[in-house]
Image (cartoon, rainbow, N blue to C red):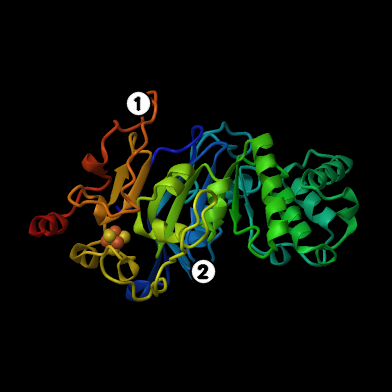
Amino acid sequence: MTGQAVPSQGGRPLIEVRGLRVDYGLGPDAVHAVIDADLTLAAGAVLGLAGESGSGKSTLAYAMTRLLRAPGIITGGRVLLHGGTGPAGEPPGTVDLLAADEGQLRQLRWSAIAVVMQSAMHALNPVITVGAQLTDVLEAHRQQMSRTDRRERAAFLLELVGISADNLRRYPHQLSGGMRQRVMIAMALALEPAVVIMDEPTTALDVVTQREILQELAGLQQELSFAVLFITHDLSLLVELADSIAVMYAGRLLEQAPASDLYRAPRHPYTLGLLRSFPPLHGERRPLTGIPGSPPDLRTPPPGCPFHPRCGFAMDVCRAEVPVAIRLGRAGERSAACWLHDGTHDLPAGLAVPEPAAAPRPATGTEPPARPLAAATPLAEPTAAQDATRTRR
Ligand code: SF4
């Protein structure tokens, strides 16, 4: 397995994705869209999932929530939802969402996990008023609520996201793009879920509206303490918004780290390239170098490291072997899937920032022991071929 399970930032693990694999199509022509993904989302935390278009971010999210449509097929892995709202009448426990039946999923959707789609215009029903769409969710999941209470709750939800309750009678096309996206967020929060998955929720909006919505979202997340998986191609946005960030490329998670650590000291060349594609938030101005080339066609992915055709640090081993994920940081709180971190290479400038002198973290019994970078540990055992490659070098 090449995924990178790193300790979650924030509270207890709420969702654990382990070894998730998703294909489009069957047989030898199947396109591997998500390969051995390992992710942990902590209760009350914001986990950002970044990467270029086509990297598999949305596919991963829809597979996690069992919303993936054909020809997408989940071919392996587990998605564990811990201690959340279990099916009605049952005690909270751990549910493997990939093994859950339709009845369980129906109970968990909206009440435990809600999704905000990219395009509110497509997600909202154009011929039903906003109020009716909000009360529909409540009617389906809170059958004991009276009609008056549902109406009041819908009005409260709209006000919560900064829209006057007068808009309950309006249809989606009568609202601006920003208001429609706020309605989607209100709908997602209707049943106070533990997790909200947001798939590029502000991409289609102008930057002013985008910032307003993100500020409101951050305030709501603090106030209501729900966890967020926030998907975007905009890494700079995640640096401000997220507690931790996972970077995806060609179906693989290449780096995971606390957001501030990833911004201050990226460990993967792809992350470094993404960070050098937008102006720094603070400090000196620097030239924007970007990343040469384009993401690979997943029907014909390159051998070895999927990023090697675009990587300025590529070595022979990168062209032949898929890098295993290496756990990094003083407490293994981050990881990177790159041969540069196998302990036998001097790290190039940009990736060789020393770890800061951090205060010792209390041992929890679940964290790996602190280790220097040079003694970093692969999360997966190297294959015999990989060992042979290392020996040859
Ligand atoms: Fe670059 Fe090699 Fe690291 Fe891939 S494994 S990111 S090609 S140095």
What secondary structure is marked by label 1? loop
> Which label sits in the foreground, 1 or 2?
1
Circle count: 2
Which residue of the protein is positioned furthest toward the top in this rendering? Answer: 362
Classify mark 2 as within 8 Å of ligand 1 or not, answering yes or no. Answer: no
Please identify the quarter of the rendering in which residue 176 is found. bottom right
Q: How far apart are marks 1 and 2 (CA)?
A: 41 Å
Q: Is residue 318 visible to us here?
A: yes
Q: Picture coordinates of residue 132 (x, y %)? A: 83, 55
- What amino acid is labelled 2 in the image? Ala
Which residue appears at 70% of the width and 42% of the height?
191
Which residue of the protein is positioned furthest toward the left in this rendering? Answer: 392
Please identify the quarter of the rendering in which residue 298 is found. bottom left
Which residue of the protein is positioned furthest toward the front in this rendering? Answer: 284
Q: Picture coordinates of residue 208 (x, y %)? A: 72, 58
N-terminal of the two: label 1 or label 2?
2
Local packing at callout 2 (Cα closer than 10 Å; few below 14, some 14-19, many 20+) is: few
Local packing at callout 1 (Cα closer than 10 Å; few below 14, some 14-19, many 20+) is: few
Residue under pointer 2: 70
Q: Picture coordinates of residue 87 (x, y %)? A: 60, 40
> Left or right: 161 with respect to 56?
right
- What amino acid is labelled 1 in the image? Gly
Residue 365: which disc?
Answer: 1
